[in-house]
Amino acid sequence: MLRYLPVRRIHARQILDSRGNPTVEVEVTVGEGVVGVNGYTARAMVPSGASTGKFEAVELRDGDKEKYLGLGVERAVANVNTKLSEAVLGENALNQSLIDHLLIQADGTDNKGSVGANATLGVSMAVARAAAMALRIPLYQYLGGCRTLKLPVPMMNILNGGKHADNTVDLQEFMIVPAGADNFPDAVRICAEVYQHLKIILKENNLSTAVGDEGGFAPDVKDTRDVLELMARAVQKAGYIPGSDIYFAVDAAASELYDEARGVYYFPGESRMKGEEVYRDSGEMIDYFESIIEDYPVISIEDGLEEDDWEGWKLMTDRLGKRVQLVGDDLFVTNIKRLSCGIRLGAANAILTKVNQIGTLSEAIDAVTMAQHAGYKAVISHRSGETEDPFIADLAVALNAGQIKTGAPCRSDRNAKYNQLLRIHENLGELAVYENPFTGFL
Ligand code: PGA
Ligand code: ZN
């Protein structure tokens, strides 16, 4: 029989995220004794996106323009402190599936539109952390069990564009992926070294070294090829070999570039830098990625096409899916309904997993499990609006995901995750596994 560890207290408050916008923090106390005497209290903080997919679960915002420009989350906080507390108090914290089921039920909609996914997720994560605490085991082990040995390969976003910066770079994220490293600490070191060399190179070229939302630099660069060129130089300057020690990855966040009325993708930065309007249709986007793959060691492309273009995604996967990882972020939104559709069609070959896209831990874990069973890869991801909560670091290890995307090796909201993974690596000792997830690609 399941041990009984009752949820004794739930309390939410409004805090600030890395962009200075409000978000939800939840504290949960579990245990059979008296609250505050022999209970275990844990806390979790909810992240928030900027380039959000239109099929994501609802992030409840107050809309009161007098406060935080309408971005307050006092309603979501109140929902935790009333409806969600009523649903979960007294229930067994060791039964995460039941807890999450009750949260979903208390909301009662398809998309958490009633209480807010920011409310449900805060409770879901804090319950898991409190349960792990009460059992006196690390969170990754609680979530993953006894076969959790794999440290994820980091995808570090060292150059920011799109909605995450005010520069001319149209694709949202340019990442370095140290898949050839020997272990996780080496991977972090290599990325940090490349990051610092990129900073020196940008300075030498009179380009800005100010950073975007995810800690990567945000200079005005002419186009994607110029960005990849700068990155290749930084990798070489740091003493590494592009394509062997380090791969590149991009997140095009193409839904943000899509001009629905005209049915094409518009590149505003490239247009500005070139003095002519640059548009690409779905087929030209695939050509564009193909030509980049030819010339640079790009191993992973996320959201190369927009979130409704299933046909285009299938075509892109047919054309490029054997050579590179094609990650569905806005396409799948960590939702098993959309993922199963993609698997059936053969669209993409990997899923990006963001816990707040769906609103409970169990549903996010279901998505990763479904992906893994279908031979899709899974990348655990932060949001552009983050907090100091390193929850996703433990989650990545727990799910043997093999990849994590959590920004540049800069800004404490990003490094909180890498630093937690360094601790987990140390904790696992000799048993820690670090391996190249891309060996299957041609
Ligand atoms: P977001 O960006 O958190 O702003 O959605 C991250 C991503 O698109 O992967
Ligand atoms: Zn994305």
Image: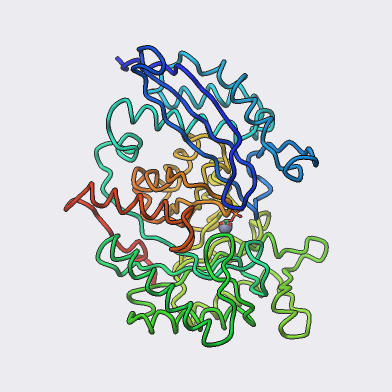
In the image, farthest residue toward the left: 430
388 or 36: nearer the viewer: 36
Q: Up-down: is 125 above or below 371?
A: above
- In the rendered view, does 331 fall on the left or right side of 352? right
Q: Where in the figure is residue 360, as x and y percent of width and height?
A: 52, 34
Q: Nearer the viewer, residue 421 or 55?
A: 421
Query: Can see residue 412?
Result: yes
Q: Quadrant of ligand 1?
A: bottom right
The number of discs equals 0
Position in image of residue 12 (x %, y %): 56, 28
Seen at 55% across and 81% down, the residue is 291
Q: Is residue 87 above or below residue 141?
A: above
Residue 141: % across, % down:
30, 38
Q: In this rendered view, identify the residue nearer to me: 269 or 32.
A: 32
Residue at x-position 33% and y-position 17%: 38
Seen in the image, is 179 located left or right of residue 352? left
Residue visible at 61% across and 35% down in the picture:
14
- Residue 405, how many percent across, how many down? 46, 57
